[in-house]
Image (cartoon, rainbow, N blue to C red):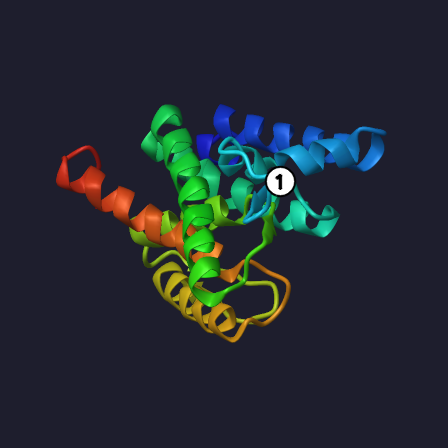
Amino acid sequence: MNRYFQTPPVVLNLIIINLLVFMATALLPVGRVVMGWGALMLGTPFFHTYQFITYMFLHANFEHLFFNMFALWMFGRTLEYELGSKRFLIYYMVCGVGAALIQYLTAIVLGELPLMLVGASGAVMGLLLAFGVLHPNVPIYFLFVPVPIKAKWFVVGYAVLELFLGWRGIGNVAHFAHVGGMLWGLLLLWWWKHRRIIWF
């Protein structure tokens, strides 16, 4: 079987952890406690530094979880095989933490604190960015678009849309975190290329 059709260990374990945490928050009596301690509570007395990591493993609802995990599975398999498991995990975590930092800074500037942040979206957007950089001409089939779009244009279009929605404050979504995940992903890829760790 072609290895790209298999799910490599880091992607698989990230999906399992996210599923288990979601089940704990949704089904167990301590679910609210887990959410309260793990969510990124920016600008509140409940903020703790570790939340910059734990927030990535919490999701608001099943749809939020499903789409993030589907994107992680879709793009993460190829990237983990190409970057290696260790480097892939580093990349994923840097994008996730970086996404939260960007959201925090923009929330300060725009006066949107206090703010609660949950979800793997920032890290997943970093994966989308990496896929677009490493495979710019691979077609991506989007659910609501009847024709394939090259990965590079999909990434550019998504980033512009997120910037617009974030600037306009549309929807209860951390749009700047999505952009932040892409930005940190681009910087990390550039750094690795500069150090001749990866080539593209």
Could you tell me the amino acid type at mark 1? Ala
Image point (56%, 33%), residue name: 54
Is residue 23 visible to us here?
A: no
Q: Who is closer to the viewer here, 120 or 32?
A: 32
In the image, residue 19 sits, relative to residue 173, either above or below, namely above
Image point (44%, 40%), residue name: 97
Q: Which residue in the protein does label 1 denote? A: 39
Is residue 53 visible to us here?
A: yes
Q: Position of residue 41 (x, y in %)?
A: 59, 44
Say how many tags the image has.
1
Q: Who is closer to the viewer here, 188 or 155?
A: 188
Give the left or right position of residue 158, taking residue 152 as reference: right
Outermost residue toward the front in this view: 45
Q: Who is closer to the viewer here, 173 or 63?
A: 173
User: Based on the displayed image, in which of its 4 quarters is residue 144 positioned?
Assistant: bottom right
Image point (56%, 30%), residue name: 14
Disc 1 crowd, CA 10 A, few/some/many (<14, 14-19, 20+)? many
Image point (51%, 75%), residue name: 168
Q: Position of residue 92 (x, y in %)?
A: 43, 37
**SS for dot 1:** loop
Give the left or right position of residue 143, taking residue 20 as reference: left
In the image, residue 48 sits, relative to residue 133, either above or below, namely above
Q: Position of residue 99 (x, y in %)?
A: 44, 48
Q: Position of residue 107 (x, y in %)?
A: 48, 59
Give the left or right position of residue 170, taking residue 167 as reference: right
